[in-house]
C-alpha cells in the first residue's frame, strides 16, 4: 500500500460532496479542516467521556477555540452502560443552558459510544444541528464515525433508538491510538478484518502479512490500513446511505455478535463479539460449501492473530439463537444474515434456518 503522512477521503451522497474523512498524526490541522463549516460566529460543544476528556479534551478545545466564538465541554461517564436516553437528556440541558441554536455544532471526541450518542443528540436537538466526529478508538475510526448512523441503547437492546444524521467532518488523529489499551485496539481490528472479508480478500491477506507492524502501532502501517478500511466503508455507505440494501453487508458477524454481547451483559467488547459472530457466519458459509476448510481456517486464524476470540464460553446455544430474533436486522420475521460467497465477497441471505444457526452457535461455544 502507498506510503503517505496524510489522507483525505471525500464522501459523496447522491453524487454530491457531503463531508471529508481526514487522517492525520496530530490535531494541528483540525481548525483548518473546519473552515468549510463557517464556524467563526458559532458555538461548539465538545462531547467527550471521563477517559478521553482528561487526555485530549483541553488540546482539542484549544484548537477549536481558534475558529469559533465559544467552546464548551460536556463530559459523560465512559462505557456502553451510559449510552442512554438519560445521558442524552443531560446533554440537551447543557445545550439549552448554553443557548445553543440550530447553526451551532457538536463535536464528538471519543469512541463509538460518544460518537453515536453525540450524533443522536445532534440529529434531535432543535430538530437537527450539525456535528463533527473526532474518533479516538480504532473501532470508531474505521466504523462508527463514518456513515451517519447514530443512536443509543434502550434498556438491554443495543442501538434500538437512533437516526441517520451525517457528520460535517470526520477528523482522525492516529497518534491517539498509542494511548488505547491493547484490548480496545484488538476490538477495532475485528471491524478491519471484517472489511477485508466482505469486500477485499487481498486487503485481508495484507493485514495478516503486516500483523507485526500493525500491532506495533507503526504509523506507516496504521495509516494505509485505516485509510483502506475507511474507503471500503465509504463505498458501501455512499451506495446505500440508509441501509436499504448493500449497507447491510457491513453487518457481517453482527447478528450473532450482538446476541453474544447482550447475553454477556456487555462484559465483552463490541469487536470481540463481532469476531465470534464472524466465526459463526464463516462456519455457516463453510457448511453450505461456499468456503473451503482452508478459507475457514484463514478466517479464524486472522482472529487469533489479532488477539480476538473465535469462541464464547458460558452461553446456551438455544438462548443465543433466541436472542437473535430481537435484532434490528430482522425483516418481516426473517433475519437478514450476511454470509461469504468467497473470501472478500459477502451477500445478504434470508434463508438461514434455525438449525443452521444452532449448529453454528454450538460450534463457537465449543472448546478449541
Image (tube, rainbow, N blue to C red):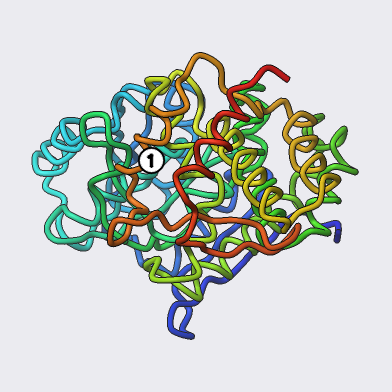
The residue labelled by disc 1 is 324
Most distant residue in the right direction? 209
Q: Quadrant of residue 300?
A: top right
From this viewpoint, is residue 26 visible? no
Q: Residue furthest bottom?
A: 15
Camera-side residue of 241 and 273: 273
The quarter in which the N terminus is drawn is bottom right
Q: Residues within 10 Å of mark 1 (few under 14, many from 20)?
A: many
Quarter holding the C terminus is top right
Across and down, in percent, residue 82 comes to 29, 26
The image position of residue 41, as x and y in percent, is: 27, 60
Q: Is residue 219 visible?
A: yes
Whole-percent x, y for residue 88 in the image: 19, 37
Considering depth in this image, is 193 or 298 the residue closer to the camera? Answer: 298
> Residue 168: horizontal and vertical position, in percent?
40, 63
**Residue appearing at x 12%, y 57% in the figure:** 126
- 233 and 280: which one is in front? 280
Determine which quarter of the picture holds residue 8: bottom right
Determine the secondary structure under disc 1: helix
Residue at x 61%, y 29% (from the top left corner): 364
Amino acid at each position: 500500500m502507498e506510503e503517505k503522512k496524510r489522507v483525505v477521503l471525500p464522501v459523496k451522497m447522491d453524487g454530491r460532496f457531503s463531508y471529508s474523512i481526514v487522517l492525520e498524526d496530530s490535531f494541528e490541522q483540525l481548525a483548518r479542516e473546519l473552515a468549510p463549516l463557517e464556524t467563526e460566529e458559532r458555538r461548539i460543544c465538545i462531547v467527550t467521556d471521563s477517559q478521553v476528556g482528561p487526555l485530549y479534551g483541553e488540546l482539542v478545545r484549544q484548537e477549536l477555540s481558534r475558529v469559533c466564538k465559544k467552546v464548551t465541554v460536556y463530559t459523560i461517564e465512559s462505557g456502553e452502560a451510559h449510552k442512554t436516553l438519560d445521558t442524552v437528556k443531560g446533554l440537551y440541558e447543557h445545550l439549552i443552558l448554553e443557548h445553543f441554536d440550530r447553526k451551532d455544532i457538536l463535536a464528538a471526541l471519543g469512541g463509538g459510544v460518544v460518537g453515536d450518542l453525540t450524533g443522536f443528540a445532534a440529529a434531535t436537538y432543535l430538530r437537527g444541528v450539525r456535528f463533527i466526529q473526532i474518533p479516538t478508538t480504532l473501532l470508531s475510526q474505521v466504523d462508527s464515525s463514518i456513515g451517519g448512523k447514530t443512536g443509543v441503547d434502550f434498556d438491554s437492546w443495543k442501538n434500538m433508538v437512533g437516526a441517520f444524521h451525517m457528520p460535517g467532518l470526520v477528523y482522525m488523529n492516529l497518534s491517539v491510538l498509542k494511548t488505547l489499551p491493547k484490548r480496545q485496539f484488538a476490538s477495532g481490528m475485528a471491524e478491519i478484518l471484517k472489511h477485508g472479508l466482505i469486500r477485499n480478500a487481498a486487503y485481508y491477506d495484507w493485514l495478516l502479512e503486516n500483523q507485526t507492524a500493525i500491532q506495533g502501532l507503526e504509523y506507516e502501517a496504521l495509516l494505509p490500513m485505516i485509510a483502506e478500511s475507511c474507503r471500503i466503508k465509504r463505498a458501501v455507505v455512499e451506495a446505500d446511505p440508509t441501509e436499504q440494501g448493500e449497507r447491510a453487508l457491513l453487518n457481517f458477524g453482527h447478528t450473532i455478535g450482538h446476541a453474544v454481547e447482550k447475553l454477556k451483559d456487555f462484559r465483552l467488547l463490541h469487536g470481540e463479539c463481532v469476531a465470534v459472530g464472524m466465526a459463526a457466519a464463516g462456519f455457516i458459509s463453510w457448511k453450505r460449501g461456499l468456503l473451503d476448510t482452508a478459507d475457514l481456517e484463514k478466517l479464524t486464524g486472522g482472529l487469533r492473530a489479532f488477539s480476538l476470540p473465535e469462541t464464547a464460553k458460558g452461553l446456551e446455544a438455544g438462548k443465543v439463537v433466541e436472542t437473535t430474533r430481537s435484532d434490528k436486522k430482522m425483516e418481516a420475521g426473517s433475519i437478514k444474515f450476511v454470509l461469504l460467497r468467497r473470501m472478500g465477497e459477502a451477500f445478504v441471505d434470508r434463508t438461514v434456518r434455525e438449525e443452521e444457526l444452532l449448529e453454528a452457535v454450538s460450534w463457537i461455544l465449543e472448546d478449541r
